[in-house]
């Protein structure tokens, strides 16, 4: 019997999310610095991508295991850790959804893209559910973590891109899997220009950079802390 690929894995291995992650490095380091990460602490970084927070955690001396569903991102994280000789930072492939918060900007991008895309395949789990407290509690609960061990806080992440909002949209169009899928579907019915305009308007409206040729977009996310 042929096995179908996990739709979540298929999505996030498409394109090159490292191009988007590069715009999030400063906020990743700032977040890690606010957590009190210290030498000897054991850290499990779920949905780690190529190490936006895992790498800074390891630099502070923590013993870090980064887990992501996308094999290409896991390999990219391993290369980054090796380049810095961070033997205390490991990356493994795994699906955090199987424990049975993501940024506001990303939520709006996905909402816009969904209007141009076909329904997701059966078994697909939206990353946005990590921003819903009840979903997070349910996932960790199935893993044996009681509700009183889980706490939530809203925080802000910054996307910082050395180019105009329109150029940043192009990065998402060319490298961010959900947006790539939306444009592929939009081209099929002649709506790609409409989608382009809608995303450019979104990025322009959210941009707080003072320079005309720069993009700086704050995005709210749900910080989840689990005590074990």
Image: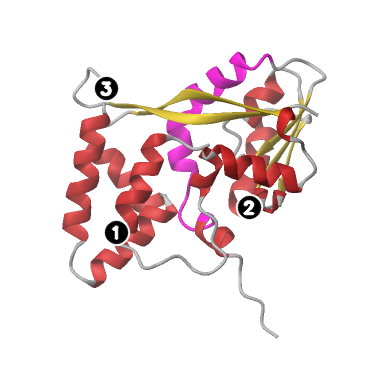
| Near-viewer residue (220 or 183) | 220
**56 inside magenta stretch:** no
Q: Residues under labels 1 and 2: Cα distance?
A: 25 Å
Position of 218 with respect to 40 (left or right) is: left
Which contiguous range is marked in magenta?
Answer: 12-36
Where is mark 3, residue-wise? 208
Label located before the other in sequence (3 or 2): 2
Colour convention of the picture:
secondary structure
Q: Position of residue 182 (x, y in %)?
A: 33, 59
Which residue is disc 1 drawn over? 115
Where 115 sits versus 109, above or below?
Answer: below
Which badge, 1 or 3, is on the more N-terminal residue?
A: 1
Figure quadrant of the C terminus: top right
Find the distance from the CA under tag 1 to the CA under tag 3.
Answer: 26 Å
Rate crowding at label 2 as few (under 14), some (14 to 19) or many (20 or more) other CA atoms within 10 Å.
many
Q: Residue at x 56, y 37 (%)?
A: 133
Q: Which residue is mark 2?
A: 69
Quarter of the figure that contains the N terminus = bottom right
């Amino acid at each position: 019997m042929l096995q179908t690929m996990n739709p979540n894995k298929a999505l996030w291995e498409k394109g090159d999310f490292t191009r988007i992650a590069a715009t999030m490095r400063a906020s990743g380091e700032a977040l890690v610095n606010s957590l009190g990460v210290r030498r000897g602490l054991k850290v499990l970084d779920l949905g780690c991508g190529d190490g936006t927070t895992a790498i800074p955690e390891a630099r502070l001396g923590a013993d870090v295991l980064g887990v992501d569903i996308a094999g290409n991102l896991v390999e990219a994280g391993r290369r980054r850790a090796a380049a810095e000789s961070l033997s205390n930072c490991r990356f493994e492939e795994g699906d955090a959804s199987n424990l049975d918060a993501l940024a506001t900007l990303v939520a709006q991008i996905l909402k816009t893209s969904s209007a141009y895309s076909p329904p997701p395949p059966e078994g697909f789990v939206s990353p946005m559910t990590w921003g819903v407290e009840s979903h997070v509690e349910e996932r960790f609960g199935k893993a044996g973590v009681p509700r009183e061990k889980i706490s939530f806080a809203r925080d802000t992440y910054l996307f910082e891109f050395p180019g105009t909002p329109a150029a940043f949209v192009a990065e998402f169009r060319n490298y961010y899997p959900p947006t790539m899928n939306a444009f592929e579907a939009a081209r099929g019915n002649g709506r790609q220009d409409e989608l382009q305009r809608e995303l450019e308007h979104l990025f322009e409206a959210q941009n707080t950079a003072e320079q005309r040729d720069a993009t700086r977009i704050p995005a709210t996310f749900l910080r989840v802390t689990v005590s074990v």
